[in-house]
Amino acid sequence: MIKFYFHPTPNPAKVALLLEETGLAYEVVPVDTSKGEQHASGFRAINPNGKVPAIIDSDGPGGKSSRVFDSTAILLYLAEKTGSFLGSKEDRPELLSWLMFIASGLGPFSGQSVHFQFAAPEEGLDYAKNRYRREAERHYEVLNKHLAGRDYIVGNTYTIADISAWGWLDRAPRVLKGLDDPLSHYPNLKRLFETVDARPAVGRARAVGKDHEFKKASDEETKRALFPSNYPKAN
Ligand SMILES: N[C@@H](CCC(=O)N[C@@H](CS)C(=O)NCC(=O)O)C(=O)O
């Protein structure tokens, strides 16, 4: 059995989709990051970085319980565990390259683009807003160009690279705030997103956590929970 530490945000969404694609048995453990539950010592023992997603696999290597944190590590771990969605062996260099491109580029720049356009205070942030939005757009362009004439990111098959991209492309309206149909500016990305989004597992992945009431308000408690480094350290 896998315990899946979840909040309805892009990085956990990728893992929800892979879990649904593989059919592995799992139990959702809600972590309400707006309430600061990611900082509880019990959760920090699972992910010392205090972020979701994380999993505990009671049937890890050697039959022992293992924790895995960080969405890309979890995608690789579960894909290897089940021998699925990894593409061909010959394409492994491509798979690793695109997975890391999403993990270290497209994802984080999208996240910062959302942060500066939606969460940061308004005053004096033009440089940061511009920088992160333009970098998010640049990463979209790189992937859009790569996808010309291809159905999927790696080889001719659906892999965890597509699953990883889906998690963030789903947030394109926030990353590129103000555009009606942001992916229409990146037709190959739009096609990939729609292909993945039409998979039956996506409906089930989108339903994950719906039975839990996550905090929606963004008040002072939320800001301190999500952006603790903006505040002086408590002694
Ligand atoms: N590199 C990490 C990033 C994880 C991450 O930023 N998770 C967000 C949700 S998408 C989170 O936990 N935010 C709450 C916080 O930062 O306190 C991954 O890919 O899993």
Image (cartoon, helix red, strand yellow):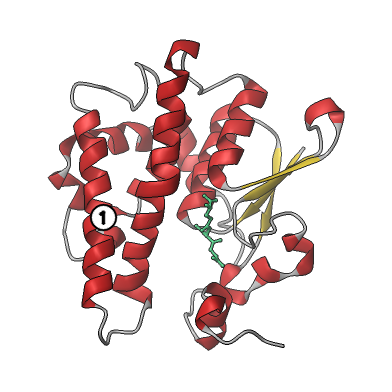
Q: In which quarter of the image is the N terminus?
A: top right
For the residue labelled by badge 1, is the local secondary structure a helix, a strand or a loop? helix
Identify the residue under disc 1: 135
- Decide if residue 158 is on the left or right side of residue 63: left
- Decide if residue 100 is on the left or right side of residue 36: left
Question: Can residue 91 be seen here?
Answer: yes
Q: Percent position (x, y) of residue 58?
A: 81, 38
Q: Is residue 34 above or below residue 89?
A: below
- Decide if residue 146 is on the left or right side of residue 234: left
Q: Neighbour class for label 1 at 10 Å: few (<14), some, many (≥20)?
A: some
Identity of the residue drawn at 19% across and 52% down: 182
The quarter of the picture where residue 56 lies is top right
Question: Which one is in front, 192 or 135?
Answer: 135
Q: In this view, does 170 lie above or below 157?
A: below
**Residue at the limit of the structure toward the left, as seen here:** 185
Question: Can residue 214 be seen here?
Answer: no
Q: Percent position (x, y) of residue 75?
A: 56, 36
Identity of the residue drawn at 40% across and 24% down: 94
Identity of the residue drawn at 27% across and 37% down: 143
Name the kind of residue labelled 1 in the image: Glu
